[in-house]
Every structure is written in structure tokens, then in C-alpha cells.
Image (spheres, rainbow, N blue to C red):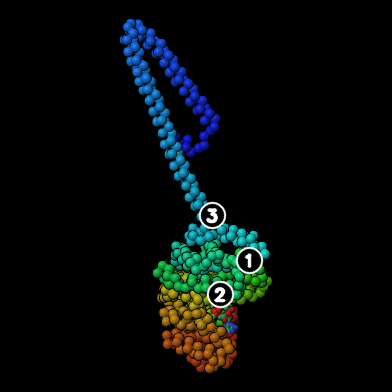
Amino acid sequence: MEDQGKYPKDPRHEQTQHLNATAATTKIIFIYLVFGFGWILLSDYIIEIIFADPASLRLAQSVKGVFFVGFTAIIFYYIIHRSIDMYVETILNLKDAYVSLDQGHKKSLTLEEKLFDLAFYDPLTSLPNKTLLEETINQYILNHPNDGLIGFVYFDIDEFRNLNEVKGHSVGDELIKEVGRLLSEKIEKPTMLARMGGDEFVLALFDITNLELFLPTIESYFGVIRKSFILDQDDFFITYSAGVALYPDHGKDYITLLRHADAAMSIAKSKGKDQIVIFDEEMVTIIKQQTELLNQLRLAITNQEFSLHYQPIIQLSDESVAGVEALIRWMHPIKGFIPPLAFISLSERNGFIKEITEWVFQEAANVYKLWKQKKKSFKVSINLSAAILMNDKFITSLIQWIKDHDIDCTKFNLEITETSIISDIDKSIHILSTLKRLGFTLALDDFGTGYSSLTYLQKLPIDSIKIDRSFISNIKEDTEEFYVLKYMIDLAHHLNLTVVAEGIETKEQADMVKKYQVDFAQGYYYCKPMTQDRILEYFKAFHMKS
Ligand code: C2E
Ligand code: MG
Ligand code: MG
């Protein structure tokens, strides 16, 4: 019965049913007529035989009439009752069929809604996904071929890859959800926030009327998410890199806007992250060059294009050489020398820094063995990238490296930048303590270029700070910078840290840092970075302090 309710009836079937009903009714009427006439004729005949006198005959006729009416009434009752029963049953069935049809319809509606959600919304954040963003932008462009302005802001979370590796994907997901929630609470229609996948989002600002207000508006949006987040009980300061493309100036369709905003975002990353960069045409060329460079970088190890150079670190009290800093060099077969700043941050962004660091440690171990054989033993400083330091597998592979090469860790100093530890200070302290336990000394590199250096300096288990070259160059006594530098030196000494001044280029600078009790200095004034055999010759001229 249910099935009958679910599907439309075949009209041919309806016609046959109608014919069957007419035939059945005719049959009943025919039987009734035959039986009625038969009964009247037969009963009259029998009564006339039985009752001879007219009075009895009339009485018998009346009784027979009453009996006939009663009998036919019973038959009619039965037939009508049965028909009404069937009718009621049919109505009930129809009602059931309608209910199940309605439920089926509702079910198919929610399924349809679910499919719609899946197609246009991101399941993790419930934000519009890239398909819906693309459709909305295309629609807008269609409706505003000559007027209208869209600010297309493509952004992602800085160091998200690290965070995911350190804390696991579910913590990463939590952060993505929270960022999405905070931002969508802040923005107002018609601005649209979409999640593109991973840690990437797009803010599309439609109908911008005042371009001067555009940047402050975006900055105010980032203001609500650029902050500390407690993730798995640890405090993370989260920043973002954003690229902006404008419709129609930077692209007249969705794909171009996306590509150009993405290019601006990678420029924001290469400029040190935590910033908003607006697209301009030159960026396309820069990005192209970077992609090309990355492809060549991948071949550099196999083609033996890397080498390590060493720059002496001078102890200022007696001008002896306290050690050397190992600095990577890339000699490209066509382009020639490519400085580390041109490829280190690029390889950090693309994960290639792991291979580079492995190569550096391998090379440092080779040189360590060589110098040991020659009975020379200099302390070697190695630069470590944030991405490497915070990677859980780093300590394990470092311990393997120590075992494989029988390394005396006290002969190595590890240089880390403050930006690498600021994102997760507790985890950094833990890692740095492990490195110290293994016997390494630790230096905080490029000190003074980050933002909150002094606040956590006392918490870190480090041995020295290396004051960045930008502080040393152009410094003159009695200027504001000079007092900051002096304060840095005093503070470091107060915390029992030694101070290294980087980038000493002139005698004046050397004299000045010496005067203000800087312990070590490094710079072209003393010596430029050199190959390992040239550095050996250089050392001969110095009294070695190892
Ligand atoms: P850094 O660790 O602060 O290294 C000091 C940089 O200053 C080196 O630049 C060095 O050549 C340069 N320098 C030294 N004295 C002077 C001077 O008197 N004047 C001037 N103008 N520069 C001076 P380099 O070799 O180009 O390295 C730049 C940065 O690249 C390094 O800064 C370091 O952060 C990174 N880097 C270099 N090698 C490696 C490496 O093996 N691994 C990692 N992760 N980073 C590295
Ligand atoms: Mg360094
Ligand atoms: Mg430095």
C-alpha cells in the first residue's frame, strides 16, 4: 500500500479499475433482480398454494413483504458497510502515503541542504569556502563591469607549519577555528570571509568607497586576531602575512585577483612576515625568480654548490680568536655567488631548510675532524633556523650526529634568532635546556631586531647575545641608539651573559664596543668569512684561545 502512495498512478490502471467496479456492480444488481423477481414469483405462487382464504393470504403477503424489506436491508447494510469500510481504509492509506511522502520530501530537502553546505561551506570553520567565494566574486564582477571595487585580502598564519608539527593537527585546527570565529564576529556585510584550505583565508571587501580607509579597516580586522592564543596550555603569539589585490586595478577576474594577492602574500613572507603587502606588477617577476631559485636550490646539494665559510669571533680583552661562525655559501654555476639571505628564508618557507641544515652539520663535522687531526680546536658557531629548532625530530637527529661523528659538544655554539623562540617560549626553553645539557653553548643572534627581546631574556638558558649589525653601524655616542646599546650591554652582563658585537667594520666601532665592555666582536674590520683552509692560515697569526 505504501508504494502506491509513493508513486503516481498509471492512467490505464485507473481505467481498468473503473471498468471492474462497473462490472461488479452490474453483476450484483443483476443477481439482485433475478433473485428479487424469482423470489416474488415463487413466493406468491407458494403462498397462494398454502393460503386459500383471502385474509390469510393478505397477511402472508404482508409478512413476506416485511421479510423481503428486512432481508434486502441486511444485504444493503452489508454492501454499504463494506464499501464505506473500504473507502475509510483507502483514505487512511492515502493519509499514510501522504505522511511518508512528506517525510521523504523533508529527508531529501535536508540531504539537499547538506550537499549545498558541503559544496559551499568549509566543514571545520563553517565559513564560505573557495567555491562560494569565487561565485560571489564572479557575480559581483558581472554586476559591476565598470564600477565597483573589491579589496581581495589573501592571508595565512605565520609559522603555522611549525605549530602543526609541534602541537599536532588538532591544535592547529583549533587555532584555525578560533581565527575564523573572531574575524567573522568582527567583519560586517558585505565583507566576506572565506577559508581557502589549510591556514589560508580570504577577506573580500566589496564596494569599497574610500581607498584611504581600506588599509586601516583591514588592520583593524587583523587587530582582533593578531594576539596571544592559549593552545594546548601554551601561549602562542600569532601573526599573519597578507597580500592584497584590488579589483579592477590588479585583476579583472577571480583567478587573477587570487594569483596576485597570493604573490603579494609571499612577498610579505619574504620581507619577514607579520605584514600586509599590496600587489604591484613587479611582484610577478620576483615570484617567478624565487620559484626558479628554489628549483635550482634543490639541485645545489647534489651538485656540490654549497660550501661553509668561517668568520673569526674576536675576544676583545686580548684580541685573541675565540672561535668562528660557520656561514653557508652558495656558488651557482651561472649566477655566481648567491648570499644566504637570498635563499635561507625562501628555504625556510618551503621546508628545504631541513636538507640545508643537515648538509651544514655534516660539513661542520668533517671540518671538526680535520681540525682535530691537525691538533687545532676552534669553537664553531652554527646558525639554526626557527623551523629546525622547533621541530621535534631535531634533537633526535642531533644526538645521532653527535654519536656518528664522536662530537665534543662543548666545541660547538648554536646561534638562534629571537623570532624563532618568541612564538612558543615554553617549548623553546625546554629545547634550549636540552641543548645545554648536551654540552652546547647557545647564542641569541641578531639581538635587538625583534620586538620584545628584553622581557624574556632572563628566562632563556643562553650564554651570549649577538648584537645586530644595525645597532653597531652609524652609532654615535650620546644618541638615543647609543643609550639603548649601552643598556643592552649592561642588562646582558647583569644576567651573566656575554656580549658579541656583530658587523664591526671600522676601528672607531671596534674601539667603542671595547670601551663599553662588549666581550667579543665580529666583523670585516677583523676578518671577512673565509674558506676552512684560509682560516687555518689566518689563525697562525693569532694567539689561539681554545
Ligand atoms: P648572521 O648569523 O647574523 O651572520 C652574520 C652576517 O653578517 C653574515 O652574513 C656575515 O657575512 C655578515 N657580516 C659579518 N661581518 C660583517 C661586517 O663587518 N659588515 C657586514 N656588512 N656584514 C658582516 P651572511 O654570511 O650573508 O649571512 C647572513 C645570514 O644568513 C646570517 O646572519 C644567518 O642568519 C644566515 N645564515 C648564514 N649561514 C647560515 C646557515 O648555515 N644556516 C642558517 N640557518 N642560516 C644561515
Ligand atoms: Mg649568526
Ligand atoms: Mg647575526
- N-terminal-most mark, 2 or 1: 1
Which is more foreground, mark 1 or mark 3? 1
The kind of residue tagged 1 is: Gly
Locate residue 492: give its quadrant: bottom left
The kind of residue tagged 3 is: Ala
- N-terminal-most mark, 1 or 3: 3
- N-terminal-most mark, 3 or 2: 3
> Could you tell me which secondary element the residue under label 3 belongs to?
helix
What residue did someone put label 3 on? 119
What residue did someone put label 1 on? 148
Q: Residue at x 54, y 65 (%)?
A: 189
> Could you tell me which secondary element the residue under label 2 belongs to?
helix
Callout 1 crowding tier (Cα within 10 Å): few <14, some 14–19, many ≥20: some
In this image, 282 relative to 500: left or right? right
Q: Distance from label 3 to label 2 (Cα)?
A: 33 Å
Locate residue 33: give its quadrant: top left
In this image, 38 relative to 504: left or right? left
Query: x and y percent of residue 484 in the render?
Result: 50, 88
Query: x and y percent of residue 185 in the render?
Result: 48, 67
What residue did someone put label 2 on? 216
Q: Distance from label 2 to label 1 (Cα)?
A: 20 Å
